[in-house]
Amino acid sequence: MTTASETKTKRISFNRTIGVAAMQGRGFYYPWAVSVADDGRYFVLGRGSDSDPRGTRYTVMNFEEEYFGTFGAFGTGEGESLWNTCTAIDSAQQLYQTDESLHRIIVRNLDGDLLNTWGEHGAGEGQLNGPAGIAVTASDELLVVDQQNGRIQKFTGDGKIISSFGESGSGDGQLNLPWGICVDSAGDIYVADWGNDRVVKFTADGGFIANYGSSGRGEGEFDAPASVVVDEDGYIYVADWANQRVQVLDSNGAFVQLTRGESNDSKWAQEFLDANSEEQAARAGANLEPDIEFNTDDPHEASAHIEKYFWGPTHLALDNDGHLLVVDSNRHRLQVFDIS
Amino acid sequence: MVTAKRNPALIVIQLAGGNDSMNTIVPYTNGIYHDSRKAIGLTESDVIDINGTLGFHPSMGPIKDLWDKGNVAIVQGIGYPVPNRSHFRSMDIWHTAESASIAPDGWLGRTIREIDPDHGNVITGINFGRGLPRALHAKGVPVASVGNLETYGLLPDIKDQQTRELAMDVFSRMYSPSDGVDAVLQEISDTGMGALLGADILRTAPEQYSSSIEYEAEVEIAQSLRDISQVLQADLGTRVFYTIHGGYDTHAGELENHAKLWHELSTAVGDFIADLEEHGRGDDAVVMIFSEFGRRVLDNGSGTDHGSGGHSLVIGNGVKGGFYGEHPSLELNEQVEGDMAFNNDFRSMYATLLDEWMGIDPHPILGENYEQFDMFRR
Amino acid sequence: MTTTMTSEKALMAHLMRRAGFGASSEELDRLVEQGYDETVDQLLDIEQPNRMSDNIIRRYHSEYSGMMGNLSAGANWMYRMVSTDAPLREKLNLMWHGMYATGYSKLANGKVLHDQIRMFERHGMGSFKDLLIEISKDPAMIVWLDNVENHKGSINENYGRELLELFSLGVGNYTEHDVKEAARAFTGWTIGNTEYMTMKSARDSVWPYGRLSFHFEYKADDHDDSEKEFLGRKGNFNGEDIVDIICEQPATAEFLSRHIYSFFVADEPPVPEWPYKPPRDPEAIAALSNIYFESNYSIKAMLNYLFKSEFFKSDTARFQRIKGPAELVASVLRLTEEFEKPDISMNPMSQQAQFMGQHLLSPPSVEGWHWGTEWIDSGALVERVNFASEHFGNLDAPGVETLVNRILDAGDDIAPEAVIDRTLDELAITEISDNSREALIDFATRQSESAPADQTRRERVVNILKLAGATPEFQRA
């Protein structure tokens, strides 16, 4: 379902679904974030589950659902991770991922070769407690959301602390278990302030600019937003995680549009169904958008029943061709939208 | 009925996840096989030929060696009526030997009870792994679950030797029979003493063991079989051994994963048999390898999905090597919804093992009479 | 047996062990001050419990959000058991789960089982009649007991039978004809997208996009709309009518009362033996049955009566239950306070209950688990003892640090006996055999005497804590 309140504003429209559930190999198992390389490939970071460690990996693919392989593993050893949270690529095409259980950052090249691992658990300067969102500035500095410490820290690519800002709280400029982060073309920083149900905008130096949104289910309201991304026109896209939807705000923060998601069957999904014709037939005969009363008004419930909806939208990213990628974690897929 | 110098032991290896039997015992000359397995089919040059039409998966060298000695029975097309493709339900069926309804007890639990009705030996049956698979469960039947033989026991986190001795002494006193305690406490105490005793007895097994065989390090199934070998050779009266090798649910990346799994398993089984032989115990044990179902005839581009009708292997000196049951037809009209049809009930294999190898009447354990295979040398 | 605390505190400890997962010594002191009846009222009256929120759990645990597998629903529940300030709700959920045992093996879907437990939360303390209707509409139950195969003109008796045998009346209180008529009345009570959902379960399919949630659907055209005869009554009964008639039966009142008694007062023999073995306390069962009728089937009223009754409070009820595995795990973790925030180690933690013989939401059959001493087979006892010992030895856990500090607070020079009594007090082991107590005192004495130079008093107290958790008495509730 999508609504819009103005004309002549940008809107997103559903293009396609890519991906399919796969405990290993070609597909995803609880994908939680995606980075786009200069060559257009999508590096989808899978959280997996600690009860089935094969899902903790990158899957590399692209808009056309070509498959380029996987790398990464569950564990505490070198180059391994436990709770994959977010990912980013810098201009040198170095691939960064955050692990909010081991409190560290893993750095690879796009072939998956391990280049570096850094991060020390703690609350001191340069230490991390639950690193979540990660973004790259125009000068290739890393912004890491230091979630449990309620702050944002800026590092060099190899982990030297540059600066930090923010503190725990719910006042202006404060953060409560923040999750996602992005940088706009002017260098301003946006943080998905998960625990405060809002998006907070800062200057490049961490000076407070504005709050967007407040707690709720209405237009322009959020419940535990996970991710935010800003395009070249300043439009703000928010993964409104607990409301199971994506919202679009204009560059002033005014509400433009929201969507619960409209997934269809991806190429990989279709291939599975082609190899399992009885299941395909049964699926064709089923109503995947049942009109029923739910036992609770938690949107999580509706998304669990209605397959096309977002279920756990954890991350948003813009690719190189004007698409908005929505990482639909509990559905093991990405929903891709055109922006126009 | 086989008589052995020592009481014959049965080692059951469960392959968890549903082993792709068609890529294990490969009908490599069958055109339908290759047509159905475009992504993950194995070729004639990949497989280790058995009889000109079937071949072992390339990783199964050690098992081929045992086959050549005439010690491997391949039971084909094994399953049960109305195949169930859910891991847990299907595994329950194999565990309880009951396909029509849900039963709480396991066939091996009932077996242990038949062997040792008075619980004279608390380690008549041992599971190597955590928790107790339902196959071994039966009301009132003590079964030890050993995660790691070297560290098995009570309060393993008390490591300091002196404190440990004190602690074990205290434990023993707390769980000793005493006056004026109610029946429940009595029962808890009996169980505690049994556990302590079992741990004490098992502790002697690694101490007595020495072998030239080096099992693969860091490979869980190899370490489990090594532990089993130690306990078997220590003559502690254990008749039923159980362990689980996981990872066979190869929906994706099958070629690589399946190869690794069968390498680990075949090497471990080969080492285990060699270890027993080295110590003159080759006649005392039979290994049964099974999985909860086979997988679909068609691959899905990277692996295979749940199917039915697989293979089991029975390995040992006492076994008459060869094929038992028929290879299921791959013809489309003889498939069952895209899966291979079973042609012999797994309980026939159970009945054979119970009767011919263990020397136990299978009827009370399986509830019915099942036709047996002529699988053992007399 | 030796008692180590005041009778009011011992009674409160007994209440908290039964109506909850135990309580620390500190908490018990506070509750004693509050008063017994007030505490019972508080336990019964929490509508909006404080516990770790769904958002927080899902934020970190992808699988407790998507709930595809057979561990997630149990582990999610373990978080709630460990963090809730309304433990009676979770104990009641455990009781209902044991009575209406539904398992992953046929559903291949963690969420539908999780949803069943949430249904128990909503209806578990209300009217038993409403609960039976909700169970009959519960998608997990419908699939588990094959009501998807129960059609007009071609009935499947499974649900009808278990409803009467295990869920309400008990064996001997109905006929085979009643089973069939009940089955006929429940035709049409099925799930939406029946073919696709049952196929996905049978194939354990997570494709293409994870699991789909189940929903109840009443198919009127598949419902047998003709006259039926059930327990001597005639009419064109639908499922609700069957439940009505069931609830009116004294046998239902007694069966339910006996279950409640067994779970909260003292272990009864296994249900299959009930036709042949009378209740331990027939008067208590009769009294509870009365309340059942007087209160119009209110579970809450029955519990209120139970907790305030003499048969509950008396000495004869103390330690007459064996802690179930989930209960033991939750009790230990509540004391150690290791899960104030989500942590990746929750899965293995929840699995400990499985290794002890209780895989939450994967019972061996609809009969649930056999309780009492059947929880203690040798493999399980080793797991239970080792679990308590390992966690009581975790000095990084805030709760363990508190326990150790409180024991050390008793003073540097106190005699081993006093240390032991203090430890037993802290763990609310209010009764202990002379045998066990003397063994523990002996341990404390000998440990001190032979202590190596680098061993601290702290470490010695921890060892004592471990052994206290290893006592046979600790297995009981």
Image (cartoon, coloured by chain):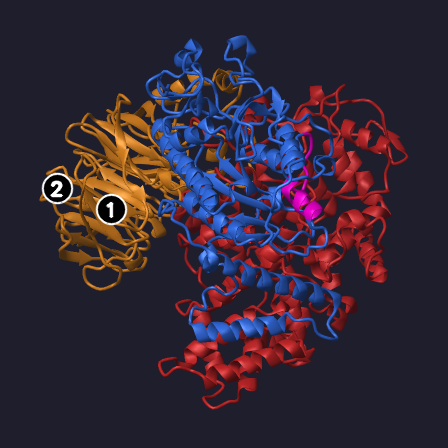
Q: Quadrant of residue C119?
A: top right
In the picture provided, is B365 more to the left or to the right than B328? right
Tell me, yes or no, if residue B180 can be seen here.
yes
Please say whether residue A72 is one of the residues in the magenta stretch: no
Q: Looking at the image, is mark 1 or mark 2 earlier in the sequence?
A: 1
The spot of residue A266 in percent (x, y) is 36, 22
Residue at image x 53%, y 75%? C26
How crowded is the residue under tag 2: few (<14 C-alpha within 10 Å), some, or many (20+)?
Answer: few
> Is A80 on the left or on the right of C190, as rendered?
left
Q: Which residue is mark 2?
A: A186
Q: In the rendered image of this protein, does residue C365 appear above or below residue B292?
A: below
**Rendered shade, chain C:** red
* Residue on which disc 1 sits: A79
Picture quadrant where residue B300 is located? top left
Can residue C331 be seen?
no
Depth check: give the residue in front, A327 or C460: C460
Where is residue C87 drawn, in percent x and y? Answer: 58, 59
What color was chain A assigned in the picture? orange
- Quadrant of the frame with the C terminus of chain A: top left
Magenta region = B100-115
Type of the residue with mark 1: Gly
Where does residue C226 sit, x and y in percent of width and height?
A: 82, 22
> The residue under label 2 is which amino acid type?
Ala
Which chain is blue in the rendering? B
